[in-house]
Image (spheres, grey):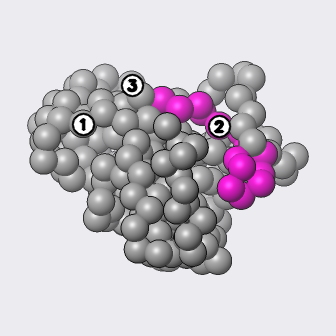
Amino acid sequence: MTLSLMSWIALDALAHRPQAVEERLVIELPKISHVIGGEFVTGDEVFTVVLEYDTPFAMPMEMQVPRLRALENHRPVFAIVGPGLPEPTPELLDWLPAEVPEGMGVWVQRNDEPEREVYFEQVMRRTMWTTGSLAVHFPSAGTYEVWIWSPDFSVGEFWYGFGVEEDFSGGAWGGVFDDWGLFGW
């Protein structure tokens, strides 16, 4: 299943690279910033984002939902599954949307705080509920999966963002970042 929520944005840009989520999406350049948009249509979907690192790596990640009354109870979550992460507890294993492969650990972002942080996304000019920027450490080289799901089977849009590095090459932004070095440091 492919969702084209962000098809209007230039997809060959590398800075905050926007992509529509698919059932399984392999990220080619996992060390740069990405934003992945999608939608839970039935509420029982599980989206997988695959990241492969050749060395340990750390970066911020967050989940956002448009701040709309219709989505006030929509709280998708994500889990990182891969080598070197903590072994999941039996309770966590029951809660996860899939079986954790043998020898892999799990780090989970739970989105169940009563008060949700609000964020104004300047590029899209939208107000979003966000988990806030969470620091995630990938402790060893290897392949990691990010599972995105809706534990209460709610439906609606989501935006999953991650990354620390910017790469404005490729020309997809039409020169809008040509003077980034004057302002972005």
Kind of residue at badge 1: Phe
Residue at left offset 75%, top offset 42%? 120
Residue 154's place in the image compared with 38, above or below, is above
Q: Is mark 3 on a helix, strand or loop?
A: helix
Q: Earlier in the sequence, mark 1 or mark 3?
A: 1
Q: Position of residue 180 (x, y in %)?
A: 53, 52
Residue 166's place in the image compared with 83, above or below, is below
Kind of residue at badge 2: Thr
Distance from label 2 to label 3 (Cα)?
A: 25 Å
Q: Which of marks 2 and 3 is in front?
A: 2
Q: Is residue 126 magenta-colored?
A: yes
Q: In the drawing, does residue 62 fall left or right of residue 154? A: left
Total marks drawn?
3
User: For residue 57, which numbered disc appears in the image?
Assistant: 1
Q: Where is residue 160 in the image (x, y as percent from the top left)?
A: 53, 50
The residue carrying pointer 1 sits among few (fewer than 14), some (14 to 19) or many (20 or more) residues within 10 Å by Cα, namely: some
Residue 132 or residue 12, whichever sits in front? 12
Q: In the drawing, does residue 165 fall left or right of residue 179? A: left
Residue at left offset 71%, top offset 58%? 124
Please report the bounds of the magenta region as a residue range: 121-134
Q: Can residue 139 be seen in this view?
A: yes
The residue carrying pointer 2 sits among few (fewer than 14), some (14 to 19) or many (20 or more) residues within 10 Å by Cα, namely: many
Residue at left offset 40%, top offset 42%? 164
User: For residue 91, which numbered disc appears in the image?
Assistant: 3
User: For residue 130, which numbered disc appears in the image?
Assistant: 2
Kind of residue at badge 3: Glu
Q: Which of marks 1 and 2 is nearer the N terminus?
A: 1
Q: What element carries label 2?
A: strand
